[in-house]
Image (cartoon, rainbow, N blue to C red):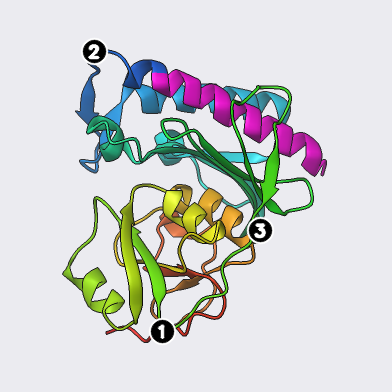
Amino acid sequence: MDMAALTRDMRRLALEAGARIMEIYNAEDFDVRAKSDDSPVTAADEAADALISAGLSANWPDITLVTEEQAQSHSLTAARFLIVDPLDGTKEFIKRRGDFTVNIALVEDGVPVRGVVYAPAKQRLFYTDASGQTVEEAGPFDLDTPGEVTPLSVSTPDNGALIVVASKSHRDAATDAYINQYACADSASAGSSLKFCLVAAGEADLYPRLGRTMEWDTAAGHAVLAGAGGKVVRFDDHTPLTYGKAEYANPFFIAYAPGVELKAPA
């Protein structure tokens, strides 16, 4: 498989989708409706989904494609598939808080091996390059010519002074109880898959998620973190988080920089 070509396509489609999302985000108003599971969806989710799906299907027709907005139409049996969340952090988008991302990932044999996470409102672009190394590209972003990139590596954590990042919209008492088992120098909140990227960039050491997520929410961020030397494990038994599960549902999980002394569930 031509990973360099896939990287170019994923990067370009993420940028194009981000531009379309920002057109809607900056409009005076936009419609919000509820999906069958009561989660919100906007015109931006649907426009970004259509754009990314068309591009991936045209350029990679032999690879199974799963997207959040079309998941009910798929029965996943492929060992290799592309998985997309065209707008992760819809609640952040609706509240105009900026912490939303475009996410595209390649999964092989249950492992996210390539990914791109683009936060258009924050102008931060993270992706795995052709070799699998995670980089952050500095803007402004040209669709065809990547700008200056910085290879990313997770921090060397100090277990006496960890930096923890947690969900902005889904933080609860159980999450706080788990975080309180650690010696934390700082605790921050962030929306969407940006939390994985903060760990990948060495800006945080630990991201626990004790709440419902789906594979499209996490695959790209997982790939970005793995490409920077990080890990993502199940919350219950600390085994690797895998993909291609029934109905795409994730268990609770922990994303972290190796060296963090993981605690058992509280």
Q: Which mark is residue 28?
A: 2
Label 3 neighbour load within 10 Å: few <14, some 14-19, many 20+ = many
Across and down, in percent, residue 146 comes to 71, 30
Q: Is residue 69 above or below residue 159?
A: above
Which quadrant is the N terminus positioned in?
top right
The residue shown at (45%, 59%) is 246
Q: Given the current orientation, which residue lies at the most extreme right position?
A: 2
- At mark 2, the secondary structure is loop
**Magenta range:** 1-22
Q: Observer-nearest residue: 57 or 207?
A: 207
Q: Which mark is residue 258?
A: none
- Which amino acid type corresponds to the residue marked 2 in the rendered image? Glu
Circles 1 and 3, Cβ within 8 Å, touching? The answer is no
Q: CA distance from mark 3 to mark 2?
A: 38 Å
Q: Observer-nearest residue: 79 or 52?
A: 52
Of the numbered discs 2 and 1, the one sitting upstream in the chain is: 2
The residue shown at (23%, 19%) is 31
Q: CA distance from mark 1 to mark 3?
A: 26 Å
Q: Which mark is residue 227?
A: 3
- Which amino acid type corresponds to the residue marked 1 in the rendered image? Gly
Q: Which mark is residue 160?
A: 1
Across and down, in percent, residue 65 comes to 58, 38
Q: CA distance from mark 2 to mark 1?
A: 47 Å
The residue shown at (24%, 40%) is 39
Q: Is residue 123 left or right of residue 89?
A: right
**Discs 1/3, front:** 1
Q: Main secondary structure of the magenta part?
A: helix
